Image (cartoon, coloured by chain):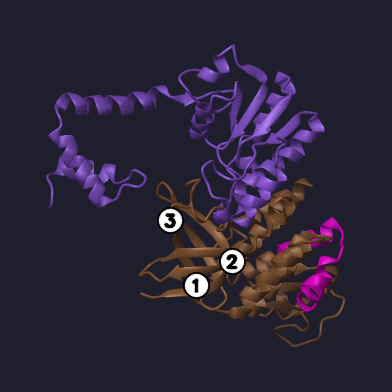
Chain colours: A brown, B purple
Amino acid sequence: MATYKEEAIVLRAYDLGEADRILSLITAGRGLRRAVAKGIKRTRSKFGGRLEPFTRLHAVLHEGRNLDTVVQAEIVRSHAPLRADFAKFLFGEAMLEMIEKSLHEDQNIPRLFDALCVTLDILEGDVEDPALLLAAFELKVCALIGYHPRLDRCLHCGRKIEGERVCMDLCGGGIACDSCSSSLESRLAVSPENLSLMRSLLNEDMATIAKRGESHRASRDALVTAFRFSESFLDRPLKTRQVVLHYLDSR
Amino acid sequence: MLYTPPIARLVEELSKLPGVGQKTAQRLAFHLLKIPGEEARSLADAIIEARERVTFCSRCFNFAQGELCDYCMDSRRDPTLVCVVERPQDIVAVERTGEFRGLYHVLGGAISPIDGIGPEELKIRELLERVRKDGVREIIVATNPRVEGEATAIYLADLLKPLGVRATRIASGLPVGGDLEYADEVTLGRALKGRLDL
């Protein structure tokens, strides 16, 4: 079993026994990995606050049969501002979970790591509406893992869609016009305004989206549509979503 | 069958405990069979008694033997000062310092959206109720200095400030006996931010 160096972002940490934790990491070169951080819960641990979720680090890991072991960790960017703002923390956690649930262990899609790095860096700064940033992130991750949503033409008849009420075909991975959508089993009604916003979120870069401001209703609708779309491809439920929507509804 | 049924059952039940695997459960089971019957019965009685008599304090949600826990019943403690912790075990850690003479409030965990735990799953509503009713003047948030604990602290501060109560956070920084050279950036940064006049 070899020791290797990787740049990684901590997605999640679970308690293991009295003082250890299991980390879920997305690495730049080896995709999703799980590793044990021994003794991390002790106040005198050599890891200190280096292995908290959101932290981007240079890690030295020892490969194990089931789990790797963290040998060394140096912070590249702690993303500390995400811990100081509840909304940013909440939407950031949703992003981390999206990445964790999109990949199988050892599966590597390098652009996912890059996308998460860029998005967390942006989330740390001034963001007009973090819900829009999360909706865009969900759509872009879907595209990167091979489920690029088709939002310009009807999936079934190929007709170009412009300014009309349509349905999201949740199994097909795109929109369906009014006449084609009646027979669909799994669909979600999408207003022309929501469709237009979804297209922008998919096509614009994250820095531009961070400056975008929409009404509360519009950004919530876009987020719900993005959630429903990505849920149809991920075979596991995402726990952050309920908390995110509850938070948005309480504002 | 590896063991006679009563031993197999004992091993199975012990292996359900946190951190106890099959091998440890087996070792514990054989130890319990070796000790005098009186000692084994005393252990069984202790488990049953704790399960039957321990409840949650209706005010702070610490473990209690009746309606209120020992801390809430102690009239010498300052009821206007409340320390908020994640779990009842954390109270023991704070008490060991001997530095705190107020009351406690146990949230029952920290906000962790990735585990599906939002503010509604914690005893936050009850804390706000206490602040309104009991004339609390300061809330010390002593959640764990992890991402989830920090987020919970921020969330509580946002709710408490409009109520006119002072919300404070326990300091975090270098452990006593630690070495500056080995401190991580986050911890050292916090230690610098929270520096004190000499």
| Circles 2 and 3 on the same chain | yes
Identify the mark at residue A57; answer none if there is no mark.
2
| Circles 3 and 1 on the same chain | yes
Identify the mark at residue A104; answer none if there is no mark.
1
Asked if residue B127 lies left or right of residue A42, the reply is right
Label 1, label 2: how far apart the Cα atoms are: 21 Å
Q: Secondary structure at mark 1?
A: loop
- Give the chain of mark 1: A
Label 2, label 3: how far apart the Cα atoms are: 17 Å
Going 57% across and 18% down the picture, which residue do you hit?
B72
Q: Amino acid at mark 2?
A: Leu
Q: Amino acid at mark 3?
A: Lys
Which circle's residue, 2 or 3, is located before the other in the chain? 3
Instruction: Residue A183: tell me if it is visible.
Output: no
Q: Is residue B109 above or below residue B44?
A: below
Asked if residue B52 lies left or right of residue A127, the reply is left
Give the x, y percent position of residue B54: 43, 24
Q: Quarter of the image containing the C terminus of chain B? A: top right
Q: Nearer the viewer, mark 3 or mark 1?
A: 3
- Give the chain of mark 3: A
Residue linked to disc 3: A38
Asked whether the beta carbons under mark 3 and mark 1 sit within 8 Å of each other, the answer is no
Which residue in the rendered view is the most extreme toward the bottom?
A158
Range shown magenta: A198-224
